[in-house]
Image (cartoon, coloured by chain):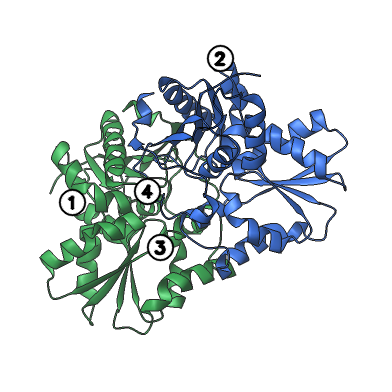
Chain colours: A green, B blue
Amino acid sequence: MNTFKRIGVFDSGLGGLTVLDAICSANKGLSIVYFGDTARVPYGSRTPETIIHYAEQDVRFLLSKGVEAIVVACGTVSAIALAELRKRFSVPIVGVIEPACDAAAKVTESNHICVIGTEATVHSQAYSDYINRMYPHLNVSGIGCPMFVPLIENGFREDDPITQMIVERYLSPIRNTDIDTLILGCTHYPFLSNVIQKTLPGVRLIDIGVTLSEVVSQTISLPNNISDNFVEYCFSDRETGFKRFDTEHLKNLPNGPIKSINIESF
Amino acid sequence: MNTFKRIGVFDSGLGGLTVLDAICSANKGLSIVYFGDTARVPYGSRTPETIIHYAEQDVRFLLSKGVEAIVVACGTVSAIALAELRKRFSVPIVGVIEPACDAAAKVTESNHICVIGTEATVHSQAYSDYINRMYPHLNVSGIGCPMFVPLIENGFREDDPITQMIVERYLSPIRNTDIDTLILGCTHYPFLSNVIQKTLPGVRLIDIGVTLSEVVSQTISLPNNISDNFVEYCFSDRETGFKRFDTEHLKNLPNGPIKSINIESF
């Protein structure tokens, strides 16, 4: 087990705060640099070249802050760029896909799981590649839900009829199928977990932030486990929208300094 | 009247193609470089600093292509960055706001107009500042419609119940008011003009691409007015989504080379 005192967590925008929240809830005494690329969000509709280029800049920024390990708190980057990042940088880098698939494989009884995410994530087949390699007895389906992030970022609540109609549009095709486990393959989606659960009663939801934070807890061992977490919040655009988020889902985030970063220079 | 043979047209993404279409419909013999910043779209939810920084890079790229005048085919950039761009660059730069306001002032009978656009556009008060200065007898209201661009970019058609519900949500508050003229303050919005008109029957819609192209026609005089237009299409990300657009609205665009640009280097 490694000992890391200072880790970096990044996302294309604010969705990664749900992962950060889960990490803070499960760990104490960590020093964390969070980076949200709010000047270039969303990544999910861009090409792999652009996503990899942005992710490399994000990692270089975090390394410049002295982090010892990196958590990719972005479903799209995890799906598209993780292998490339691991090739180019020597620090440990964890992403959301492997822990989420491992968790889904553990709970499915029908052996048919489904992944929802951005267009880029679903198109990448990163989840099905990993599942096919590690759990070849499982079936994997995928559904791109590109309107979920705009809904959440524009403050539409779960009980809004527009939210319900869009969730219904994307997910009703898998209601009453043999799919019993759904991976929420984008860190924004926990904000919609209630309406998703209502749309798909009986299906087990996998929150990629929670499964990732469990892996983080297993791989880091803190010298001092009793002190509070320290988080520095960095954004490429001013932290627009930070407050718009439903803080009910972000109960474990400590206060901390908020900084603006010119990400293009990294 | 100036004589320009080669102009640059740019937008945060693909919406500016509606402006380009209007320009091509009204002018012949132009050589045009179109730039769509698809690697960083959307601009409308970003801060003014970031929007100005991106717009400057966009202009520098177009100048590197030898254009003699620049058309800002983006509602958000026109609202936030036009004054700054005119300070920093000496070529003529036209934006969508002034022509749209002039057109609205000409047709309104109730003297109450409304502008819809991205959050950044409406928040900037660029339209109301210009109207108050030039047409102080007019009232101006504004409504931010941040879900319209994601709807269009994700292929939701005008007759989709979800589209209709979102349009209704944003625009029903001004139905049956004294507003008789609505400026569609974002170059994407013509894709929704039918459903907007149905939601607000009797209200006159101003298409900022059409009013802008009229100004372009008045300010440029072409040496040879009979040849075809030549357009080079440049994008910062690969031209994802180009084909997804409803080409019914883009009938006048000539074929032309499509190129990828590293916009961060400008």
Is residue B7 placed above or below A96 in the rendered structure? Answer: above
Query: Which residue type does callout 1 highlight?
Result: Thr
Which residue extends farthest front?
A: B226
Left or right: where does residue A110 sit relative to residue A261?
A: left
Q: Secondary structure at mark 2?
A: loop
Mark 2 surroundings within 10 Å by alpha-carbon count, few (fewer than 14), some (14 through 19), many (20 or more): few
Judge by depth and name the residue closer to the eye, A137 or B75: B75
Task: Give the distance between the C-alpha atoms of the residues marked 3 and 4, in whole angstroms.
Answer: 17 Å
First-in-chain label (4 vs 2): 2
Task: Give the distance between the C-alpha atoms of the residues marked 4 and 1, in whole angstroms.
Answer: 38 Å
State which mark lies toward you, 3 or 4: 4
Q: Secondary structure at mark 1?
A: helix
The residue sitting at 81% across, 51% down in the picture is: B179
First-in-chain label (3 vs 1): 3
Question: Would you name the residue on which mark 1 appears?
Answer: A219
Question: Would you name the residue on which mark 2 appears?
Answer: B90
Tags 4 and 1 on a common chain: no
State which mark lies toward you, 3 or 1: 3
Q: Secondary structure at mark 4?
A: loop
